[in-house]
Image (cartoon, rainbow, N blue to C red):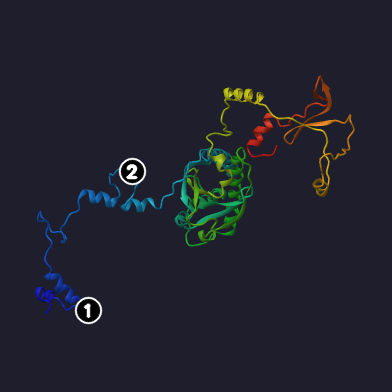
């Protein structure tokens, strides 16, 4: 018998597998672990300290404020944090004003449109949050070569139907569950979606002209996958109120869709440009005018075979196909400045300018345009 067997006679041999009964017997014979203060460490009556609770919940007050742990880290893992686009908010504020007028003319009734929120969401999370039934319209931005999504909740769909068919005012539209949308409802909602997209084109036009066309209308969120589930998107929520009736309309724009105009959306106001510094411009102009550049006088240029060039020796004469009174060209690098005639002043060779200087055709306005990526 080994030493461990003598110390613990109730324990099973090491070569035998542990059964539930043997494990319970072994636990019963194990001594309790007691701390110095007399608190039982392995028991169930131990209470967590405040620091341990804060650490588990993710509210620990450490030096690193950006570190997240515990439950707070799990909650923050699903959030999407992206840069703010100031111009996008201005565009959708303009869309609300345009829609208020267009929908009043369309319904011949009072319609109030309000901008509820503009948020960054993950595409997959938004699709999973859509409540059924709903009308989903995929539209394409032609100039941006990508797609967007318009979602009309069922409450707004039935309110539009009730308003267009002369329902009573001040009463919410009845909700009919358990049936798909009819072809008449889809056609009428398609007209409303076309109206929204037309006003959206007008709202984007001062910033970047774009054409929105309806690609298809679906009622199942699984058939409107225009982006990967983990990709980020902008969700714009518009609230429609038609005298007690109405609902919400969502416009979803993936970040990949608005990427071509991202630099424009980052501006704080339309046509934002940095101001010029006249002191720096004057200093730069003074230094440029005082800069010395080499000017080359080219008498003539000719071409000959390489074999003849290799046979040239001292004393050989090269014949140029030029007359003594022929013009020469003045060059600064690869740029031809002007033409001239070779002469002599005192004991030095001189060139007389015979044609005006060939100035650059690039103006200041054309240079500014070229700086923004457009050809001059």
Quadrant of the rendering where the N terminus is positioned: bottom left
Could you tell me residue 280's position as x and y percent? 58, 25
Residue 4 lies in quadrant: bottom left
The single residue placed furthest to the top in the displayed view is 346
Q: Is residue 250 visible?
A: yes
The residue nearer to you, when weighing 305 against 57, is 305
The residue nearer to you, when weighing 129 against 196, is 129
Could you tell me residue 12's position as x and y percent? 16, 78
Q: Is residue 90 above or below residue 217?
A: above
**Circle 2 sits on which residue?**
65
Q: Taking 340 as reference, is 23 left or right?
A: left
Could you tell me residue 245's position as x and y percent? 48, 46
Q: Is residue 163 above or below residue 294?
A: below
User: Which residue is depicted at the point 23% across and 48% down?
Assistant: 51
Callout count? 2
- Residue 61: which numbered mark, if any? none
**Circle 1 sits on which residue?**
17
* Spatial CA span between label 1 and label 2: 50 Å
SS label for mark 2: loop
Question: Counting residues from the N terminus, which is met first, the one under dot 1 or under dot 2?
Answer: 1
Q: Is residue 144 above or below residue 7?
A: above
């Amino acid at each position: 018998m080994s030493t461990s067997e003598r110390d613990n006679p109730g324990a099973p041999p090491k070569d035998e597998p542990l059964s539930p009964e043997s494990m319970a017997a072994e636990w019963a014979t194990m001594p309790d672990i007691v701390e110095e203060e007399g608190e039982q460490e392995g028991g169930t009556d131990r209470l967590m300290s405040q620091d341990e609770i804060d650490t588990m919940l993710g509210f620990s007050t450490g030096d690193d404020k950006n570190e997240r742990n515990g439950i707070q880290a799990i909650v923050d893992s699903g959030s999407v944090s992206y840069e703010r686009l100031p111009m996008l908010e201005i565009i959708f504020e303009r869309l609300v004003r345009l829609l208020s007028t267009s929908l009043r003319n369309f319904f011949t009734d009072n319609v109030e449109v309000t901008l509820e929120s503009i948020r960054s969401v993950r595409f997959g999370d938004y699709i999973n949050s859509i409540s059924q039934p709903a009308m989903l319209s995929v539209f394409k931005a032609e100039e941006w070569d990508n797609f967007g999504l318009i979602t009309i909740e069922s409450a707004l769909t039935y309110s539009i139907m009730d308003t267009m068919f002369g329902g009573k005012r001040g009463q919410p539209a009845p909700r009919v569950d358990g049936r798909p949308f009819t072809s008449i409802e889809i056609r009428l909602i398609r007209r409303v979606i076309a109206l929204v997209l037309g006003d959206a084109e007008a709202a984007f036009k001062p910033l970047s002209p774009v054409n929105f066309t309806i690609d298809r209308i679906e009622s199942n969120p699984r058939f409107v996958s225009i982006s990967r589930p983990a990709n980020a998107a902008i969700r714009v929520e518009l609230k429609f109120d038609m005298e007690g009736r109405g609902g919400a309309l969502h416009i979803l724009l993936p970040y990949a869709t608005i990427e071509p105009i991202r630099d424009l959306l980052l501006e704080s106001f339309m046509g934002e440009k940095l101001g010029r510094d006249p002191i720096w411009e004057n200093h730069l102009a003074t230094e440029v005018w005082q800069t010395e550049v080499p000017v080359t006088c080219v008498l003539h240029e000719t071409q000959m075979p390489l074999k003849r060039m290799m046979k040239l020796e001292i004393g050989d004469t090269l014949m140029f196909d030029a007359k003594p009174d022929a013009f020469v060209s003045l060059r600064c690098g690869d740029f031809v400045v002007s033409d001239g005639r070779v002469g002599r002043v005192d004991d030095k060779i001189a060139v007389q300018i015979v044609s005006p200087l060939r100035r650059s055709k690039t103006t200041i306005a054309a240079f500014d345009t070229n700086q923004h990526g457009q050809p001059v």
